[in-house]
Image: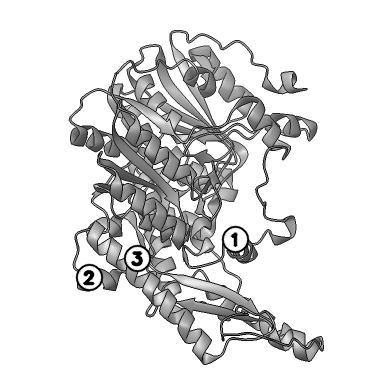
């Protein structure tokens, strides 16, 4: 069975007059990682295999393809494509650069275009939609469920302590309020407006003005292929077999994965390490999708000790999490003498900003979600439920007032709460102080930008929370200049697990990581599960921002 899953077919050679087919049917990730059972599970269910794309591979491959005379164009084969806005913006830049290099065309076809797939289609020379297809342009929105009234009915009381003045720190808001705060509504509205502006700029490139785009979203005309064509959002309607037959008559069609497998490696002696800090920041060791106390620190130290590595780019794609782990990584960066440049992806907020703030320079996409400089702690008590509803009596014996704290059966008194508030305020003061030093800002100038307030990357550059708008390419170029090198190869850390180890982990044989139970598949309940596994002070973004 292992052999059947891991066997590989011969890679087709790249012919002259090739059209690269990039399948947009899965998620856009920092680095694509293979699920050994993904193809098997999909085949058993009679479904197409969703193909995640690695932005790292696309960045290198599209630049190479632009100058490769064998490659004459790109076909974006649309499907259930998903991406965060930061990575979507970088892919947009890479595709535009491909077109600009030698004028090679980009085509796109699909029966179904997600809104983010539609945003990419606006870059194409020709956009084709199935006659009965869907072009999902509907605007940007989000929802959040609030649990306070629910908890009140059962006698459950969240104990939430936020840094003083952290009114924008909304990660715990659903547990302590029955409706959205003005501060949270303000920052969410600001973000989604900027994201819609980004989509609008893409369509302006196609010649579709904002009024037409807004009308299309208002009336959701993407459900009607003829209306979508009439509005100029697509250029033609056609069936897949006819469209593909046309392209195969004109070009040699080659799948992106087959082309990427043949990209030549750089022979440059010097290296720039790219350390991927991806996922929530927890108290464990960390893995490919989480940041822990070990994996990122080990990767940074490995890059620091490697004489061939002349600079480090820390790629942050994290909503934050444990303040303690964030501080450990921050301290590690502080001690590295080589240039350390941060490149922010979809989000680098709260703890994600904590581990960014003392780099030599911060690059961010205009649509990156960043900032959220704030601290909180969240616990739960159920005194009313246990004593009044269930009739349980819990007695205490202790030498000091905090000996049995936290106690599920007893809400803290004012003195205990004051102790927690002082601890959180001290953590917030430490966080803001380190940001001020890392960004060379006066604290009085910084504090109005904090309080948990979420910003876009564009805002961050305007407010001096970041240095430059730009993606990984720009960060690498800057790192090379800082290191005084002209040619280099990239060295990615931490290493991605492959082969039999990855296969066994897909069965859970080699992994003891606590997965979120199926019955907690809700953003607020998942947040509770994360907080239960990672107690202590949190520098963490509200999950609602990660679903935009």
Real-space CA distance between mark 1 and mark 3, rounded to the nearest whole angstrom: 21 Å
Query: Left or right: where does residue 254 sit relative to residue 154?
Result: left
Element carrying mark 3: helix
Judged from the image, the secondary structure of the residue bearing numbered disc 1 is helix
Name the residue nearer the viewer: 347 or 157. Answer: 157
Between 352 and 231, which is closer to the camera in this rendering?
Answer: 352
In the displayed structure, would residue 416 be above or below residue 8? below
Q: Which residue is mark 1?
A: 530
Q: Residue at x 56, y 90 (%)?
A: 413
Measure the C-alpha gap from mark 3 to mark 2.
Answer: 11 Å
Q: Earlier in the sequence, mark 1 or mark 2?
A: 2
Residue drawn at x 53%, y 13% is 249
Q: Which mark is residue 431?
A: 3
Q: Earlier in the sequence, mark 3 or mark 2?
A: 3
SS for dot 2: helix
Q: Position of residue 490 (x, y in %)?
A: 36, 28
Neighbor class of circle 1 (other Cα within 10 Å; few <14, some 14-19, many 20+) is: some
Taking depth in this image into account, of 516 and 226 the one nearest to the observer is 516
Q: CA distance from mark 1 to mark 2?
A: 31 Å
Q: Which residue is mark 2?
A: 443
Rendered residue at 51%/48% (across/down): 115
């Amino acid at each position: 069975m292992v052999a059947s899953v891991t066997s590989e077919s011969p890679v087709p050679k790249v012919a002259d007059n090739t059209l690269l087919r990039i399948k947009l049917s899965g998620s856009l990730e920092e680095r694509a990682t293979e699920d050994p059972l993904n193809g098997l599970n999909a085949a058993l269910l009679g479904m197409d295999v969703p193909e995640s794309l690695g932005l790292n591979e696309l960045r290198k491959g599209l630049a190479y393809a632009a100058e490769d005379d064998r490659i004459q164009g790109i076909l974006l084969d649309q499907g259930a494509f998903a991406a965060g806005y930061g990575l979507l913006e970088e892919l947009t830049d890479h595709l535009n650069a491909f077109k600009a290099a030698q004028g090679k065309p980009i085509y796109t076809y699909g029966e179904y275009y997600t809104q983010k797939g539609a945003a990419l289609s606006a870059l194409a020379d020709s956009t084709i939609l199935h006659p009965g297809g869907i072009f999902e342009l509907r605007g940007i929105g989000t929802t959040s469920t609030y649990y306070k009234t629910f908890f009140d009915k059962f006698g459950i009381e969240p104990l939430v302590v936020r840094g003083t003045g952290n009114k924008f720190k909304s990660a715990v808001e659903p547990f302590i309020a029955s409706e959205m705060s003005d501060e949270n509504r303000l920052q969410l509205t600001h973000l989604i407006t900027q994201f819609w502006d980004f989509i609008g700029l893409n369509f302006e490139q196609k010649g579709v003005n904002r009024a037409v785009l807004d009308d299309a979203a208002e009336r959701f005309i993407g459900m009607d292929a003829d209306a979508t064509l009439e509005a100029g959002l697509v250029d033609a309607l056609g069936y897949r077999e006819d469209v593909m037959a046309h392209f195969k008559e004109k070009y040699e069609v080659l799948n992106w994965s087959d082309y990427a497998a043949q990209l030549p490696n750089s022979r440059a002696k010097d290296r720039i390490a790219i350390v991927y800090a991806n996922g929530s920041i927890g108290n464990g060791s960390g893995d490919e999708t989480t940041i822990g106390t070990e994996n990122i620190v080990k990767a940074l130290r490995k890059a620091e000790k490697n004489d061939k590595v002349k600079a480090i780019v820390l790629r942050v794609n994290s909503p934050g999490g444990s303040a303690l782990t964030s501080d450990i990584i921050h301290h590690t960066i502080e001690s590295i003498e080589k240039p350390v440049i941060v490149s922010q992806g979809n989000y680098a907020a709260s703890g994600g900003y904590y581990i960014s703030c003392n780099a030599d320079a911060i690059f961010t996409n205009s649509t990156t979600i960043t900032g959220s400089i704030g601290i909180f702690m969240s616990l739960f008590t159920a005194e009313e439920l246990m004593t009044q509803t269930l009739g349980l009596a819990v007695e205490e014996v202790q030498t000091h007032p905090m000996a049995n704290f936290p106690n599920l059966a007893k809400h803290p008194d004012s003195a205990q709460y004051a102790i927690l508030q002082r601890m959180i305020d001290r953590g917030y003061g430490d966080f803001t102080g380190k940001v001020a030093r890392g960004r060379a800002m006066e604290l009085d100038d910084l504090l109005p930008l904090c309080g948990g307030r979420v910003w876009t990357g564009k805002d961050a550059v305007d407010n001096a929370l970041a240095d430059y708008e730009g993606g990984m390419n720009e960060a690498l170029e800057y790192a090379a200049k800082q290191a005084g090198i002209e040619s280099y190869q990239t060295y990615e850390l931490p290493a991605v697990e492959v082969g039999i180890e990855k296969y066994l982990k897909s069965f859970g044989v080699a992994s003891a990581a606590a997965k979120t139970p199926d019955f907690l598949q809700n953003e607020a309940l998942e947040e509770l599960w994360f907080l239960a596994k990672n107690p202590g002070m949190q520098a963490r973004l509200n999950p609602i921002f990660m679903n935009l």
